[in-house]
Image (cartoon, rainbow, N blue to C red):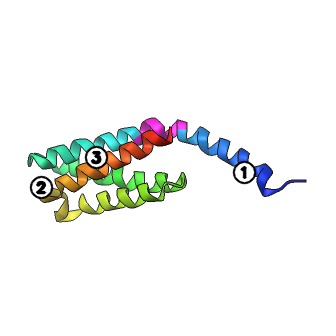
């Protein structure tokens, strides 16, 4: 007879395998956010970098939620909003974006 408890370890193992599979991509996306935040801080963020950071944040928001990292999803969405439109080029957002990227990096590293 199958119960939720019996199925749970299988689900956990499957999520762990997926986590390991997507970890390099997630780390890459966080690196994109970190680089963009540094560029913004020195007022050298290109439109291409901003768009790439916006996309990376959007994708991180989705994948982190899949792995139950709700706070990560919230942080990534905040970065996505900050990199969108005119906000994405405001150097005053740089410090906040650096902190978001650092928190996301720590969260992902801590989940390994």
Label 2, residues with CA under 10 Å away: few <14, some 14-19, many ≥20:
some
The residue tagged 2 is 91
- Which mark's residue is nearer the viewer, 3 or 1? 1
Residue 10 location (% of width, % of height): 72, 45
- Give the prevailing secondary structure in the magenta stretch: helix
Q: CA distance from mark 2 to mark 1?
A: 46 Å
Say which label, 2 or 3, has the lower sequence index.
Answer: 3
Residues under labels 2 and 3: Cα distance? 14 Å
Q: Residue furthest right?
A: 1
Tell me the element at label 2.
Answer: helix
C-alpha span from label 3 to label 1: 34 Å
Q: Nearer the viewer, residue 74 or 54?
A: 74
Judged left or right of residue 5, residue 107 is left
Q: Which mark is residue 87?
A: none
Q: Residue 11 appears at what percent x and percent y?
A: 69, 48
> Based on the displayed image, in which of its 4 quarters is residue 20 positioned?
top right
Between label 2 and label 1, give the one nearer the viewer.
Answer: 1
Which of 81 and 47 lies nearest the eye of the viewer? 81
Rendering coords of residue 43 (x, y %): 8, 49
Q: Which residues are magenta?
A: 20-26
Q: Earlier in the sequence, mark 2 or mark 1?
A: 1
Q: Which mark is residue 8?
A: 1
Q: Secondary structure at mark 1?
A: helix
Percent coordinates x, y for residue 61 in the rendering: 42, 56
Task: Look at the numbered disc 3 and give the secondary structure of its residue.
Answer: helix
Mark 3 — residue? Answer: 33
């Amino acid at each position: 007879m199958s119960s939720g408890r019996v199925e749970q370890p299988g689900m956990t193992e499957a999520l762990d395998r997926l986590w390991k599979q997507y970890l390099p991509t997630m780390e890459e996306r966080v690196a994109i956010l970190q680089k963009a935040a540094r560029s913004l801080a020195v007022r050298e963020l290109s439109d291409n970098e901003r768009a790439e950071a916006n996309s990376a944040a959007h994708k991180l928001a989705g994948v982190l939620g899949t792995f139950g990292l709700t706070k990560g999803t919230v942080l990534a969405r905040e970065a996505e909003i900050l990199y969108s439109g005119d906000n994405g080029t405001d150097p005053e957002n740089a410090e906040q974006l650096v902190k978001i990227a650092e928190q996301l990096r720590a969260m992902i590293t801590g989940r390994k």
